[in-house]
């Protein structure tokens, strides 16, 4: 598989994650007192920041053989943090709302976690290609 295809896949998966986060965790929220006024929510911005770093920094680091190890490292850290946070909030929300366990798969963040891990494994394949081309 070519490096360009894997790099494009890595970028597109990161952009898909960024768009999902922006849709779900939009950091510009209506003010509680006056809903017509939009207010910045720093907590929601942090959940938007991880996929933004994935799109910009991780993709940039994977463009070079010298820096691909750092891209692989950051990609792994982002995926692990994302998995823990998404699973935690999904389980906490389901427990608070008493959602039946049968609904947990389709109404949870499991598909989002799957996208994150697909992004990681794409980065792993790209990193492996860089390693093979050195030998």
Image (cartoon, helix red, strand yellow):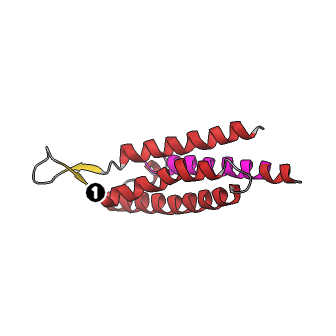
> Element under label 1?
loop
Which of 94/130 is in front?
Answer: 130
Residue sitting at the far right: 135
**Residue 107 within the segment the image draws in magenta:** yes
> Which residue in the protein does label 1 denote?
41
* Image position, residue 121 (x, y; %): 67, 50
Q: Residue 83: in sight, yes or no? A: yes
Badge 1: how crowded within 10 Å, few (<14), some, or many (20+)?
some
Write down the quadrant of residue 88 in the picture.
bottom left
Predominant secondary structure in magenta? helix
Up the image or down, 80 lies above or below 53; here it is below
* Image position, residue 83 (x, y; %): 53, 59
* Image position, residue 114 (x, y; %): 57, 48
The reply, left or right, for residue 98 in relation to residue 121 is left
Up the image or down, 54 lies above or below 2; here it is below
* Quadrant containing the N terminus in the rendered view: top right
Identity of the residue drawn at 49% across and 51% down: 51
* Quadrant containing the C terminus in the rendered view: bottom right
Instruction: Magenta stretch: give its range.
Output: 106-129
The reply, left or right, for residue 29 in relation to residue 46 is left
The reply, left or right, for residue 49 in relation to residue 116 is left
Up the image or down, 15 lies above or below 75; here it is above
Up the image or down, 56 lies above or below 87; here it is above
**Residue 46 within the segment the image draws in magenta:** no
């Amino acid at each position: 598989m070519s490096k360009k295809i894997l790099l494009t896949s890595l970028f597109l998966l990161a952009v898909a994650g960024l768009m999902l986060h922006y849709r779900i965790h939009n950091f510009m929220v209506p003010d509680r007192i006056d809903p017509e006024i939009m207010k910045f929510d720093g907590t929601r911005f942090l959940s938007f920041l991880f996929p933004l770093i994935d799109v910009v920094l991780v993709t940039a680091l994977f463009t070079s053989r010298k820096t691909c190890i750092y891209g692989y490292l950051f990609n792994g850290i982002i995926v692990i943090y994302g998995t823990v946070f998404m699973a935690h909030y999904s389980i906490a929300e389901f427990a608070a709302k008493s959602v039946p366990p049968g609904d947990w798969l389709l109404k949870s963040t499991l598909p989002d976690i799957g996208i994150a891990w697909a992004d990681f494994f794409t980065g792993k394949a790209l990193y492996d290609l860089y390693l093979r081309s050195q030998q």
